[in-house]
Image (tube, rainbow, N blue to C red):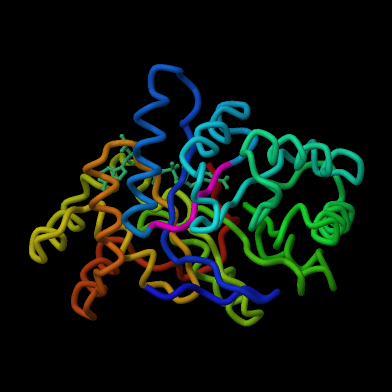
Amino acid sequence: MTGLRLPGGGEIPRLGMGTWRMGERARDRAAEVAALRLGLDLGLGLIDTAEMYGEGGAEEVVAEAIRGRRESVFLVSKAYPHNASRRGLPQACARSLRRLGVECLDLYLLHWRGSVPLAETAEAMERLREAGMIRHWGVSNLDVADLEELGPALAHCATDQVLLNLAHRGAEYDLLPFCAARGMPVMAYSPLGQGGALLRHPALKAVAAARGATPGQMAIAWTLSRPGVVSIPKAVDPGHVRQNAAAAEIILSPEELAALDAAFPPPRRKRPLAML
Ligand code: NAP
């Protein structure tokens, strides 16, 4: 599966791995590291983490998983909004780099909007790029109006990472077209609805069963059927990791997409961007 072009040049893989809830308990660490290594072996070439996940613990799990294979990973981390200031961002980024054991992030995101002005964060991100600490920067959980507020800096923003799955399609109404018009990929988080009710939905189960796939695979394949979208399912269970990697091969047919639209209708009007 080919990657998506980033506004600043280079590519971002379309299917990767999330790490929320990793790095929280020492007894889970070996399984988490093994899951990320397995995913990399199976071609899931992007890892999404954040300073928030396990308060740095997830970044340390990622460090162990990517040791000796940095070049084959597109590495994404995120800063807390309260660290996204002119002074705070370089310090937060340096801490993330140290925990991850790398010299440079492929992509660094503002996790969500806080009280620091977006223009200040964008400027601090540009300084990190010039200093070689990050290759690209972007945002997360920003709606169209927030992106517009970035002004000229929007041209340098690589992505917006948002909640997007069959049960949360609001971003399709205006955010996806807005980003597509600017050549900016969107990252879909929680593509599996966090493994909850979405995967038990009878319509999703039926479409999956008819194709001989699992509901999780169909949920991921649906996010990948949206143009310009990167999907980052999180999995520790090795069976889940294998299923998720194989979802890259599933191209949904018009009939399957219509069945999913009937059960999970696309948005017909603007709603505020949902977030977790
Ligand atoms: P998710 O990926 O939708 O779901 C993860 C859950 O689904 C886990 O419980 C996992 O179980 C289970 N699972 C994984 N593959 C499965 C499969 N094939 N079949 C059935 N269950 C499966 O939820 P998420 O972790 O919230 O979102 C993904 C990533 O997006 C996060 O990890 C994080 O990196 C990012 N994220 C970003 C934001 C933000 O504000 N920017 C917010 C939320 C998430 P096991 O782990 O036991 O395998």
Relative to 47, say whether 83 is above or below.
above
Q: Can residue 275 be seen by looking at this rendering?
A: yes
- Image coordinates of residue 244 in percent, x first then y, are 29, 54
Q: Residue at x 74, y 34 (%)?
A: 95
Q: Residue at x 80, y 60 (%)?
A: 129
- Residue 173 in the image: x percent, y percent? 52, 70
- Residue 162 lies, with reference to residue 51, above or below; the image says below
Q: Is residue 4 left or right of residue 51?
A: left
Residue drawn at (62%, 26%) of the image = 55
Q: Quadrant of residue 206?
A: bottom left
Residue at 85%, 73% in the rendered image: 152
Would you place residue 57 above or below residue 204 in this image?
above
Residue 260 within the magenta-colored segment of the rendering: no
Ligand 1, by image quadrant, is top left
Residue 180 location in percent, x, y?
A: 58, 78
Which residue reaches farthest front?
68
Asked if the stretch drawn in magenta spans residue 45, the answer is: yes
Q: How many marks?
A: 0
> Does residue 145 appear to the left or right of 197 in the view shown?
right
- The residue lying toward the viewer, choosing from 191 and 108, is 108
- Is residue 194 visible to us here? no
* Vertical side of 89 occupied by 226: above or below: below
Q: Nearer the viewer, residue 248 or 221?
A: 248
Which quarter shows the N terminus? bottom left
Image coordinates for residue 44, horizontal then vertical, percent: 39, 57
* Of residues 216 and 143, the one drawn nearer to the viewer in this rendering: 216
Give, as a single range, the part of the protein colored magenta.
44-49
